[in-house]
Structures are given as C-alpha cells and as structure tokens.
Image: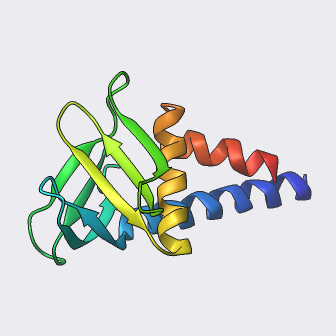
Amino acid sequence: PDLKKARDVFQAMLMETVEAFLRSGVVFNKIGRNGKIYQRIVRWSKDMKSVEWVKALGESPRYVLMNSINNAKAAISTDQHGDEICNLSSDHRSLSLVLENNSQRHWAEVTAQVVKHRSSIAAYLESISKQL
C-alpha cells in the first residue's frame, strides 16, 4: 500500500511538473513564413489544446491547434544547414522552431510524442511514469 501511494504521488507530481513546463513555455527562434528568424515564447495553452506563441508575455497569442485527431502533426528533423527543427502543424497553421538547447529539445520532444500518440498530456505522462 505504501509503495502504491508513493508511486501515485510521484505520477501526480510528474504530471504537474511537465504540464507546468509545457504551459510556461520556452524561448525559441521561430522560422517565419518569409524565412526570417523571430524570437518567440512558445507554450501550450491553458486548456492544453493548442500550442501558442507570443512576442512578449501579455500580448494576444497566435496558435496551432494540436487537438485535431486527424490533422495535427509534430516532427523533429534536421534542415539543410544542420539545425535541428521542430515542425508543428494542423489545418489552421504551422510553426517551425529551431532547437538550440536542452530545454527546447525536451519541450519539443514531449510535444511531438503527445501529438504522435494523439493522447492528452495526462495520458501520455501516465504512460511514461509507469515505465519508471
């Protein structure tokens, strides 16, 4: 009973920590549709249904809906310059982010896995915490 309770507490803490990380966002260099680089804060929305980006905290966000069962996509690849890029897309919009540090990579990897498996953040995190 004590081991199960400890595991449940750990899973809850893990979910809260990762959700807070995804929602608080990370500063990325975003590749614009014109090919120019723009620094943006990229985060999951409060309802965890979309990824949004802003120039600065407090402005109205632009967003990519990530809860579309059929059309949301996330992929991490290397471009022709050797830069690691995270591409997020849906019917609504797309977003390309340059991955330059571990925080950016972690954020992008969790986002890509959630979208790939078409699961909620909670379901995805529960599956990884069971493997620990």
Q: Residue at x 32, y 29 (%)?
A: 68
Residue 58 at x, y percent in the picture: 13, 75
Q: Residue at x 30, y 65 (%)?
A: 42
Q: Is residue 105 above or below residue 119?
A: below
Q: Residue at x 51, y 42 (%)?
A: 114
Does residue 14 appear left or right of residue 38 in this picture? right
Which colour scheme appears in the figure? rainbow
Q: Residue furthest left?
A: 60
| Residue in front for this viewpoint, 66 or 75 | 75
Residue 48 at x, y percent in the picture: 36, 49
Quarter occupied by the C terminus? bottom right
Instruction: Classify residue 113 by image quadrant.
Output: top right
Q: Looking at the image, how many numbered discs can be counted on the residues? A: 0
Q: Residue furthest front?
A: 80
| Residue in front for this viewpoint, 78 or 96 | 78
Q: Residue furthest top?
A: 70
| Residue in front for this viewpoint, 84 or 42 | 84
Residue 13 at x, y percent in the picture: 63, 64
Q: Residue at x 37, y 24 (%)?
A: 69
